[in-house]
Amino acid sequence: MRLPVLVLATAFAGASLVPAAAAVPGPAADAAPGSPATAPATAPVAGPIVQMFQWPWDSVAQECRNHLGPKGFGAVQVSPPQEHVQLADKGYPWYQDYQPVSYGLQSRRGGGEQFAAMVRTCKESGVEVYVDAVVNHMSGSGSAGSGPGSGGTVYEKYRYPGLFEDGDFHDCRRDITNYNDKWEVRNCELVGLADLKTESEKVRNAQIGFLNGLVGMGVSGFRVDGVKHMPPEDVGAVFGALDGDPYVFQEVIADQTTPASEYTGNGDVTEFAYHGKVSNAFRDGSLAQLANLPDQMSLPSEQAVVFIDNHDTQRSSPTLTYKDGQRYDLAVGFELAYPYGTPQLISSFAFDNPDQGPPAGDGGVTSPASCEDQRWVCEHRRPVISGMAGFHKAVTGTGLTNWWDNGGGQIAFGRGDAGFAVFNTEGGQLSQTFQSSLPAGTYCDVMTGEVADGRCTGGTVEVGGDGNFTATVAAGSGLALHAGAKVG
């Protein structure tokens, strides 16, 4: 949740609704909340995480099987699966999904059976499933009078039948106004959203039951929305009590009042400084400044989740997005090549209005996502990004080697003996002999093609016995080689 300036675009980034009748089974009423989770060393997948923003469950399953698994993506982050408000008078905006009304599994993307089938298909394809979890709040003031939720639940703000009642919410029932006051940030309302008493055993047990139901269906992890608005011990008590030790990464838009490090005891944390630093460098062409990138971040690499854009920044601070074409693709390629943090990508839908919801049919039900449909952007299928997903998987566990730059918008670096990448954001071509640690051989440039039937569909590069190779990289493009893409 990004506040206070980016009110709508970030405040609603974490709620969803589902009918109580379809609620996921939970623990016994007297189950004790857990202690803070032990922070994992890194995401338990080799390939990158891709946020399939607003994709329906059937479409996610198909994409896992047909593209994400074969191309080396490690996990999908799916939109909140629980029942949410329906804001027909506002054209069914994207943020309605971040306003839950129950913990039943009936969203505009599908129901519980479709969700479970999607999880099974993705896991069978080698892709884990992470859920965007909304536990800070329920619905907001703007949904008053909007009718039942997406699963038919009739509700009021502060009253959600069979789940939460008035006493389960904080008493500060006004919007947050002072972000320098940590108590207010954690106890007052984020743009009118009913703020749950996450310190309450009843609230925690209900959330643990819902999340454990998802774990029981095969969900492997959670992106926790709006974490800044909850005390670290509350987040730890809920997510530390889950079965199976799922991977947890927390959305924290850090500031002087709430540093990201405050939450690292519960799991990984989103490093928002990364997207600004890297996006600005690729937008302005000042790539040489990225040589010592980890020193410019607040979190150690093993606890940072990084991104070039997500569903919030696309709308509220769009330094680079899909609308920026090749410059954006190269920035994402760098994210996948450089050894800092766990990379999170996005695959989204086209929009002109920042509040605009996904492509939909009658009643706001989301239309099937297809990369042949121009309404769905499918960033993950762009050649540079798709090719670099495999690069990232191939170089996981290796360090930075053989850095080179021209002091401006041309850089190159290796990942041990597993890979080498070149980026050129300047107006002229880059012709250079590079020193790498790659074994000798013929390599496919995975930014332009892939290995198919023993041949490269794009460019090739010959690496000599000393690791050297000579290449010409056109203006505004890049080149990437890795040990898994050799031919001959």
Image (cartoon, helix red, strand yellow):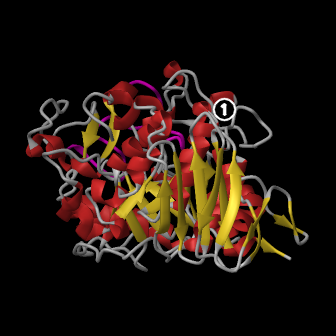
Find residue 133 and report its horizontal and vertical position in percent: 41, 55
Q: Is residue 154 magenta?
A: yes
- Residue 275 occupies which quadrant of the picture? top left
Quadrant of the frame with the C terminus? bottom right
Tell me: residue 199, above or below residue 275.
Answer: below
Q: Is residue 120 left or right of residue 8?
A: right
Asked whether the viewer can see residue 24, the reply is no
Determine the residue located farthest toward the right in the rendered image.
Answer: 453
Q: Is residue 240 magenta?
A: no
Q: Is residue 320 left or right of residue 296?
A: right
Find residue 304 and report its horizontal and vertical position in percent: 36, 61
Secondary structure found at label 1: loop
Q: How many marks?
A: 1
> Which residue matches tag 1?
359
Query: Residue at horizontal 38%, vertical 41%?
Result: 276
Quadrant of the frame with the N terminus? top left
Query: Residue at horizontal 46%, vertical 69%?
Result: 400
Query: Residue at horizontal 17%, vertical 59%?
Result: 199
Asked whether the viewer can see residue 205, the reply is yes
- Residue 99 occupies which quadrant of the picture? top left
- Magenta part of the chain: 144-166
Find residue 324 and report its horizontal and vertical position in percent: 58, 32
Q: Amino acid at mark 1?
A: Pro
Q: Is residue 138 left or right of residue 147?
A: left
**Looking at the image, which is closer to me, 182 or 159?**
182
Query: Residue at horizontal 36%, vertical 75%?
Result: 40
Give the prevailing secondary structure in the magenta stretch.
loop
Find residue 72 and report its horizontal and vertical position in percent: 66, 67
Q: Is residue 104 left or right of residue 479?
A: left
Tell me: residue 173, above or below residue 268.
Answer: above
